[in-house]
């Protein structure tokens, strides 16, 4: 039998052999393709695909660290972190977007359109609502919606609510500090988040985790602020602002020995648990963010500078010109009509004329240097955001009018905190401690990170500070020659201080307003051994009273008395416990009383109100406080040339008591024509009288 060419398999048909060859070829091709793809995946695109796999299946999970607590000086909580419940969704796992959004909207009171947009994405995670109430969280759990879950996360709580709100500030929903101490101390309070790598399945759920790094809690910040004293200050301030329908107000209470802030109150205030309220109320920490021309309170530091420089003595007599004195073309005016006052009495009676004469003798450069040494025109370095330094122009460039106005508190701007710190230095024997709110910072392990205890610096001689204390105490004196705070009561304690009522510059009319005032009081208590310095400012009171002693003085009295009692300071059994009645001395005479030509006086300093463009006219007059409980100020006419009978008729018409010396025509009168306190006795000398 003849065989044909090729290989033949007995019993296998040609068709079967063909199919086998085709199958072999296909299998070889497929195996080659798989091998090629494997090479491509493993070698050519290996790095890219491995990175993509990690992104899809491995993710880093972060757990926020518990934010550190903020405590008061006695360890009581002012800001703490606690777990709150929040609702989130995995949009990929949500089956019915519209239905889910509708049910969640009813349970959580959300906007349904916005929620639908959030759930209709291709993301694995989206917040639905954060920090919900326990009732809302329970309602969401009961719905058992696919892709929707409830979790717990830290939330910041402020137990004191509005008390000290602007000082503490608040933290955002993710735990970052946004205002106040929460912002200033954010790095220490935040701590370190927990981070670990985790695998997730195709539905985005975490399957397993490895390499867990525990969260490190934030540091604990303990303040110098005392929660009880803060409440006292907040309550007293709120009452005064409400009573006098004022625009705003501030109170600062400092520990004289250390400079520690015991309380710092602002009105309007806000509840840090509701940060939106802060924006709505336009609230801020005014003792550090606001600066003012405070008026007569600054006379204390003019006198302090002069005593320290040795250019005057507490008992030196000054001719205060009957309350009216011409400096160049300007007249400086007092409300009362004293003729001679000691340096101490210039503080007691708040004489503008006396303060200006002291300032002129001291000189511009020495007064400027002293004010800067006392802390004005520079930051205190307090641990709070937004501190303003105020403005004092270089003393070498002052003109005479600037030296005159700065001597009694106009032409420079200062903050309430700066005044409090300088006043505390007087009570501390001339040693200035920068004001601070943070007493101690403790790490999560209990280690002390920071401890307050900065050394003080001498800003005046101890003898100067000692001489100022009785001067400040005399401001509370009663009687015919009483001080400007004679009506201010500090129950159970003897205090010292200074009243102030300043006209405010009105940018709308480019001059000082005749109806917008800043009422202030700065003082020390108890005055024989000061423990606290208290500064009160009430901005634009609009009620019947606007004088410093009437508006800010009672706040000082309440805060000082209640704080000292709380601190356990022994009271003075001889201190008055009831108001003394109507004092005879006017409370702070005309602060910006500078009169002269019709041409506006020069602006006190560059950058102060009205410093750009045409300088503002200083107000014609401004009573710091009237006699007693608001006794009337009457007008004394010019009696010159009048006969005795006509003079007596004119005096009776104005309710004036007169003493007549001689007969004929009136040639001299005391006091001179102008404003005077009700009850003032006018002495008239006639042409042929002895």
Image: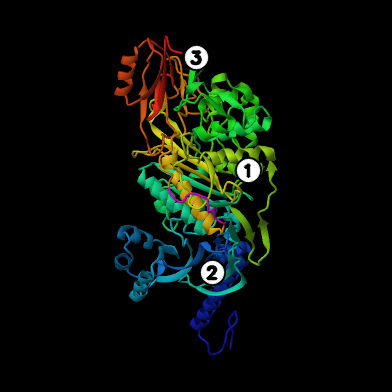
Which mark is in front, 2 or 3?
A: 3
How far across and down, in percent of the image, does residue 439 sit?
Answer: 62, 56
How far across and down, in percent of the image, does residue 429 sit?
Answer: 66, 43
Q: Secondary structure under badge 3?
A: loop
The residue labelled by disc 3 is 329
Label whose residue precedes the other's in the sequence (2 or 1): 2
| Label 2: few (<14), some (14–19) or many (≥20) C-alpha neighbours in 10 Å | some
How far across and down, in percent of the image, does residue 452 sit?
Answer: 65, 54
Is mark 1 in CB contact (under 8 Å) with mark 3? Answer: no
Q: Nearer the viewer, residue 352 or 289?
A: 352
Quarter assignment of residue 315: top right
Quarter assignment of residue 388: top right
Q: Nearer the viewer, residue 88 or 623?
A: 623
**Measuring 55% from the left and 61% from the top, which residue is drawn there?**
71
The residue stretch that appears in magenta: 569-578
6 over 76 or under it: above or below: below
Q: Quick check: is 317 in the magenta stretch?
A: no
- Principal SS element in the magenta part? loop
| Label 1: few (<14), some (14–19) or many (≥20) C-alpha neighbours in 10 Å | many
């Amino acid at each position: 039998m003849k065989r044909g060419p090729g290989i033949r398999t007995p019993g296998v048909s040609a068709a079967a052999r063909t199919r086998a060859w085709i199958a072999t070829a296909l299998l070889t091709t497929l195996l080659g393709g798989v091998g090629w793809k494997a090479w491509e995946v493993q070698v050519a695109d290996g790095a890219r695909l491995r990175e993509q796999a990690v992104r899809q299946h491995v993710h880093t999970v972060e757990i926020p660290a518990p934010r550190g607590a903020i405590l008061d000086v006695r360890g009581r909580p002012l800001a703490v972190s606690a777990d709150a419940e929040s609702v989130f969704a995995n949009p990929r796992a949500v089956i019915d977007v519209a239905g889910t959004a509708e049910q969640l909207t009813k349970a959580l009171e959300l906007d349904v359109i916005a929620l639908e947009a959030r759930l209709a994405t291709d993301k694995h995670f989206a917040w639905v609502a954060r920090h919900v109430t326990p009732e809302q969280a329970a309602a969401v759990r009961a719905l058992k919606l696919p892709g929707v879950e409830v979790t717990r996360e830290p939330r910041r709580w402020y137990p004191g609510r509005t008390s000290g709100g602007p000082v503490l500030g608040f933290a955002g929903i993710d735990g970052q500090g946004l205002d106040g101490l929460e912002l200033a101390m954010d790095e220490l309070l935040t701590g370190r988040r927990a981070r670990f790598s985790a695998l997730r399945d195709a539905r985005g759920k975490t399957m397993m985790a490895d390499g867990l790094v525990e969260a490190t809690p934030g540091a604990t910040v303990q303040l110098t602020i005392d929660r009880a004293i803060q409440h006292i200050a907040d309550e007293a301030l709120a009452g005064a602002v409400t009573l006098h329908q004022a625009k705003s107000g501030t109170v600062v209470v400092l520990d004289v020995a250390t400079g520690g802030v015991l309380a710092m109150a602002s009105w309007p205030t806000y509840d840090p648990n509701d940060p939106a309220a802060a924006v709505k109320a336009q609230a801020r920490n005014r003792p550090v963010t606001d600066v003012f021309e405070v008026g007569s309170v600054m006379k204390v530091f003019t006198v302090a500078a002069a005593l320290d420089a040795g250019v005057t003595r507490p008992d030196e007599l000054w001719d205060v010109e009957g309350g009216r004195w011409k400096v160049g073309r300007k007249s400086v005016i007092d409300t009362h009509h004293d003729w001679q006052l000691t340096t101490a009495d210039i503080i007691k009676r708040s004489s503008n004329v006396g303060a200006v004469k002291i300032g002129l003798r001291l000189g511009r450069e020495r007064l400027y240097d002293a004010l800067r040494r006392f802390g004005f025109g520079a930051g205190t370095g307090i641990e709070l955001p937004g501190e303003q330094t105020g403005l004092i122009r270089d003393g070498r460039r002052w003109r005479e009018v600037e030296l005159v106005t700065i001597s009694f508190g106009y032409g420079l701007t200062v903050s309430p905190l700066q005044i409090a710190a300088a006043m505390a230095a007087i009570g501390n024997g001339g040693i200035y401690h920068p004001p601070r709110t943070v007493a101690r910072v403790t790490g999560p392990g209990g280690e002390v990170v920071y401890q307050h205890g900065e050394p003080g610096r001498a800003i005046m001689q101890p003898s100067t500070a000692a001489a100022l204390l009785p001067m400040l105490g005399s401001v509370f004196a009663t009687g015919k020659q009483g001080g400007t705070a004679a009506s201010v009561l500090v129950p159970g304690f003897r205090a010292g201080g200074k009243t102030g009522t300043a006209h405010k510059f009105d940018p709308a009319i480019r001059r000082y307003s005749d109806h917008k005032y800043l009422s202030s009081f700065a003082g020390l208590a108890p005055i024989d051994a000061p423990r606290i310095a208290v500064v009160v400012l009430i901005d634009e009171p609009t009620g019947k009273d606007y004088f410093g002693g009437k508006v800010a003085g009672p706040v000082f009295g309440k805060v000082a008395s209640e704080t000292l009692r709380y601190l356990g300071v022994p009271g003075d059994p001889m201190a008055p416990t009831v108001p003394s009645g109507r004092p005879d001395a006017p409370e702070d005479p005309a602060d910006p009383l500078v009169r002269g030509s019709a041409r506006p006086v020069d602006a006190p300093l560059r950058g102060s109100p009205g410093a750009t463009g045409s300088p503002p006219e200083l107000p014609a007059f401004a009573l710091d406080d009237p006699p007693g409980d608001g006794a009337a100020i009457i007008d004394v006419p010019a009696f010159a040339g009048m006969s005795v009978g006509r003079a007596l008729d004119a005096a009776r018409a104005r309710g004036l008591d007169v003493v007549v010396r001689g007969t004929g025509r009136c040639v001299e009168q005391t006091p001179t024509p102008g404003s005077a306190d009700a009850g003032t006795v006018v002495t008239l000398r006639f042409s042929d009288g002895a």
